[in-house]
Image (cartoon, rainbow, N blue to C red):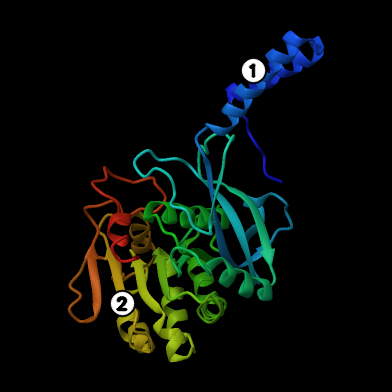
Amino acid sequence: MKKFHLSKTALIALTFLSLLLAAGCSKNSTDTFNKWSDDLTKALTTERPFQEIELFYATDRKATGSTVPDKAFGDEQGKLSWGACSVTIPYDKEIKDLQKSHFTMTSYGLSPACGYKITDIRQLPLRSFGTTLPKRLDGNPDNSALIFVHGFNNSFEEAAVLTARMSYQLQYQGAPLFFSWPAQGDKLDYLEDEQRADHTVPQLTEFLKEVAEKSTAENIYLIGSSMGCEPLCEALADLNLSSEDMDRIKELILITPDINRNKFAEKIFPKLHNTRARITVYTSSRDDKLALAHKQRNGVRLGDVVNNADLPGIDFVDASAIDSSLDGKPRFVKQTSIYNDISNIVK
């Protein structure tokens, strides 16, 4: 159940209301009651809107059985499950309100959200997932779908928050979705996460297939981050769709991909012949997770800044001079955000 938080003005008004009711129902008290009632109504309808966004998801994390939304899934491998969750959007005076769509909600009379947080989560059977998403897209301002796959050391909650932040920063009005694989959000275990990312490919492939075939979205954008880029590329290469459904996948965006570059060039890239999606790779010499990857694995990563002449057809963007983080916590003084560039791709 959602928790509602009244503003200070509303709380004061309610206090006076209780005193007035205790004082009786004389004409003077009735007039005063009406005045405070008007003030209460004004307080409840003039607060800054409390915005939420609804995200659809799939995950092969094992459900914990917890009724607390941000603890619904742990870091153990489980069966593929589907659902939707709502995430609060904190107000940013530079971005202002999130643009309205069938996936956004605005409530008045609530305290402004102080951060991104999952407020509720609803697990859906596959059949419901496959019918609910198209209904939401029907008549939506933007008939498209954005699918995000997180990277190393992210929990389910963090995956939802990153997707919500991305939607807000991009002012995206289509259907926001994410796939969460069982990375260990509370443990810094690179090699274990690497194995789990590899094991998640069949489930991620099934998720992409379901969205492509059932969503009715005219344009589908795939965005991967860090270690999540490899299973995303593998899943895209393994997709067995009709040419019509395959052509609706317009963009594959890889943000500082933690993939062995030789492996990508020799084994993954040749298999991507089945897609016409434009591929954009953001590289960086200042990415924290790539720095950690170099300590664990030898060899150049696809997200490193190197000569990429041998990979024709891919747009490489050196993001070393900008903030390439997605969590809103830049590791250096940012000049601009990577979202500014992605917004030119996801239209």
**Taking 288 as reference, is 238 left or right?**
right
CA separation in Å, label 2 and label 1: 61 Å
Circle 2 residues within 10 Å: few <14, some 14–19, many ≥20: some
Q: What percent of the width, then of the height, locates residue 12?
A: 64, 18
Q: Which amino acid does label 1 sit on?
A: Lys
Provide the residue designation for mark 2.
278
Q: What percent of the width, then of the height, locates residue 195?
A: 51, 72
Determine whether 180 is above or below 335 in the image: below
Return the residue nearer the eye: 33 or 128.
33
Q: Identify the residue at image location x=60%, y=57%.
A: 85
Return the residue nearer the eye: 107 or 237.
107
Determine whether 335 is above or below 130 in the image: above
**Taking 344 as reference, is 247 left or right?**
right
- Determine whether the residue tagged by mark 1 lies in a helix, strand or loop: helix
Provide the residue designation for mark 1.
35
Determine whether 162 is above or below 26 in the image: below
Of badges 2 and 1, the one in the foreground is 1
Q: What residue type is labelled 2?
A: Arg
Residue 284, by quadrant, is: bottom left
Q: What percent of the width, then of the height, locates residue 44?
A: 60, 31
Circle 1 residues within 10 Å: few <14, some 14–19, many ≥20: few
Return the residue nearer the eye: 89 or 46.
46
Q: Is residue 330 visible?
A: yes
**Taking 122 as reference, is 234 left or right?**
left
Residue furthest to the front in view is 27
Q: Can residue 180 be seen in this view?
A: no
Q: What percent of the width, then of the height, locates residue 310?
A: 20, 82
